[in-house]
Image (cartoon, grey):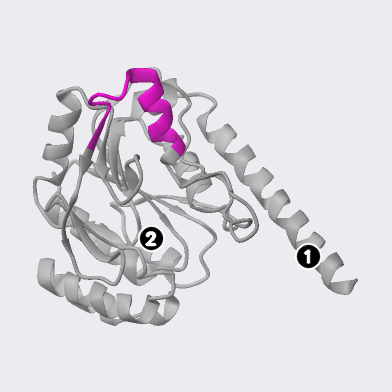
Amino acid sequence: MIDKVRARLVSARRRMVRSLGLLEAWRSRRRPPTTYRPGVTVLTVNWNSSSFVKVLVDAVRASSPASTEILVVDNGSTDDSRDYFASRDDVRTVLLSRNFGHGVALDIGVGHVDTEYLAVLDVDAFPISSDWLDRAIEDLNAGARIVGAHMHRNFVHPCFLVTRTQMVHEFDLTFRPVGSLATRDSAAPLFLDVAEAMSQRVLIKFGGSGALRFYEVTSRRGPGNAGEVYGDLVYHNQYATQGRHHDLALQIFAEAVDKYHPSLSKSVSDGHDAT
């Protein structure tokens, strides 16, 4: 009986936090810009991953035009992330009071973007090519609506996703996941991952041919998605901040930083305990 009550309390708290996050996302996006400035905003979500976000910020700076803006939505971190953000005058932040989840935090961040292009990176991803944004924008100009990483299924994964900000605002596209995997063992769940519903809505709205432009995996270290490069443009390590391969993934991530951005290796070796 006590376990059931505890489970119900946990469930109620999750619903409350989710509702607060959705309200914050609505507030941030209720008045979209009337005009959009030239340029790109790189958006990421951080939660107690200071060593990874440091690599991402410096790698974006090293691989992108000087005018590229960086926006970090911080999901209530308690490590040294916020001290780091305070030390960077070239990084904008949205500091949330608690962890609202990845997809909701991205939706909140989109409400603070008014550049023509929006580029989303996971906190454990980073560009490895100086033309990563040029390639993406070229494909958008050729007719694609969303471009980026093809990890699995028929959607652009938000570890590396580039689109036009106005389209996200105009059609109220959301990064939030849909459904849950909680019933996977006992039922066939409905589940769309973070940004998956966005790709599906774009496919329906604009037609399947060319609406999405996938960058396939061009190299993989493994296991699973622990160290993949998409289109020779962006590196991502899905298990670096979570998952069953966490310890090995940290090692693989550090080796990737040393390979692609050796000057940033110290950021990885200092502070993995925070993750």
Picture residue at 45% right of the left edge, 46% below the top: 194
Instruction: Tell me the kind of residue under disc 2.
Output: Phe
Q: Is 125 part of what is drawn in magenta?
A: no
Note whether 274 is above or below 38 in the view shown. Answer: below
Q: Position of residue 183 (x, y in %)?
A: 63, 56
Q: Position of residue 67 (x, y in %)?
A: 18, 41
Segment colored magenta: 197-213
Residue 128 versus residue 187: which sits nearer the camera?
187
Say what secondary structure mark 1 lies in. helix
Q: Quadrant of residue 271?
A: bottom left
Which class describes the residues within 10 Å of circle 2: few (<14), some (14-19), or many (20+)? some
Residue 14 versus residue 190: which sits nearer the camera?
190
Note whether 270 is above or below 48 in the view shown. Answer: below
Q: Which residue is mark 1?
A: 7
Q: Which residue is mark 2?
A: 85
Cα distance, mark 1 to mark 2? 36 Å
Note whether 72 is above or below 168 in the view shown. Answer: below
Q: Which mark is residue 20?
A: none
Q: Quadrant of residue 23?
A: top right
Which quadrant, please, contains the N terminus?
Answer: bottom right
Instruction: Tell me the kind of residue under disc 1.
Output: Ala
Which class describes the residues within 10 Å of circle 1: few (<14), some (14-19), or many (20+)? few
Picture residue at 88% right of the left edge, 73% below the top: 2
Q: Is residue 244 left or right of residue 161?
A: right
Q: Is residue 109 left or right of residue 148?
A: right
N-terminal label among 1 and 2 = 1
Picture residue at 18% right of the left edge, 76% below the top: 255
Q: Quadrant of residue 139?
A: top left
Residues at discs 1 and 2 in contact (Cβ within 8 Å): no
Residue 123 versus residue 84: which sits nearer the camera?
123
Q: Is 202 part of what is drawn in magenta?
A: yes
